[in-house]
Image (cartoon, helix red, strand yellow):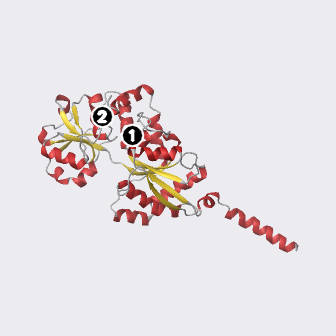
Amino acid sequence: MIRSRLLALACLFFVSPAAADPVSDFYAGRTISLSIGYAPGGGYDTIARLLARHMGKHIPGKPSFVVRNMPGGGGLIAANALYNIGNRDGSELGIFADTIPFAPLWNTAGAQFDPSKFHYLGALDRREAGVALSWRASGILTIDDARKRVVTVGSTGPHDITAVAPRLLNALTGTQFKIVGGYRGIPEGALAMERGEIDGWQGWCWPCLKDTKPEWISRNSILPLVQFGAERHADLPNVPTIYELASNEDDRRIMRLVFSSDVMSRFVVVGPGAPADRVEALRKAFDNTMSDPDFLAEALKGNIPLHPAKAADAAALIRDAYATPPALLVRARAIVNGD
């Protein structure tokens, strides 16, 4: 009798602590919802479903995933739902576009959330900096030329980088860019430049341009006027960055703030209130997924671009933006909103 009791106690002592894993216990047999603010079939839907197929195996308990499409408001509907009515237990995730975490900063109508209270797991797209470019036939050869005469640039929308960037350059560097809206995307803008309808385009990432329009570069059809990155790209050593054009540190800080949303995109977040141990497990799972050979092979096969960023980098980007002094924020808002 005594021996059997001792064995039972030994089993309890050695087995129970090893088996106790509250994170695994929570996620075992559970389905995690992954919300995106766009309709099925697009880029966000494709990358969300790719993540959903692989991330679960890296989470303790190996939960399954389901993707929820919640289109509307450029992603605001999905963000509002995750923040205001989502479960606060770590079972609901979201993928946000670049503009979403900064929407309250710009007083965007319809933004009903505090970005600092989301838990950032990382981002799927750390972006290459864009450029402002001109069509050589327009006669605009340098950024100084854009200070001397009106230069028409195409735009896909008043709050898109294609409009915000030229407004910023006009306000802080003395250029005379005239924004022509109504283009539904880069392909239409490219055709407009080739036809001579507009003089240039802004916010096109340089590596993307090399991939999609190599003939423009080989024929010297376009000229990069200024870069929006912190440093000059290796391919463009003679093209100044926008920060080099600033006349003072306040203007440089406004530039960094305005271009915050152009640094990374496709933020992966868990809703507010999730327990710390589950958030940490999800962050580790995200990082492990980004180096998962099966995940990477499927992304490569599907031609899905991946340039991931860590949780700390994503959170720091948001935190630094919201730490902007009020006076500078007022100036930045006027530029972004076209006031």
Residue 238 falls left or right of residue 339: left
Numbered label attached to residue 260: 1
| Residue behind mark 2 | 244
Q: 10 Å neighbourhood of mark 1: few (<14), some, or many (≥20)?
A: some
Where is 264 relative to 26, above or below? above
The N terminus sits in image quarter: bottom right
Question: Which amino acid type is marked by label 1?
Answer: Ser
Where is 83 relative to 292, above or below? above
Q: Is residue 118 visible?
A: no
Q: Position of residue 128 (x, y in %)?
A: 33, 48
Q: Position of residue 34 (x, y in %)?
A: 48, 55
Among the 4 quarters of the image, the one containing residue 168: top left
Residue 307 falls left or right of residue 33: left
- Give the residue furthest to the top: 327
Question: Which amino acid type is marked by label 2?
Answer: Glu
Where is 156 relative to 208, above or below? above
Callout in the foreground (1, 2)? 1
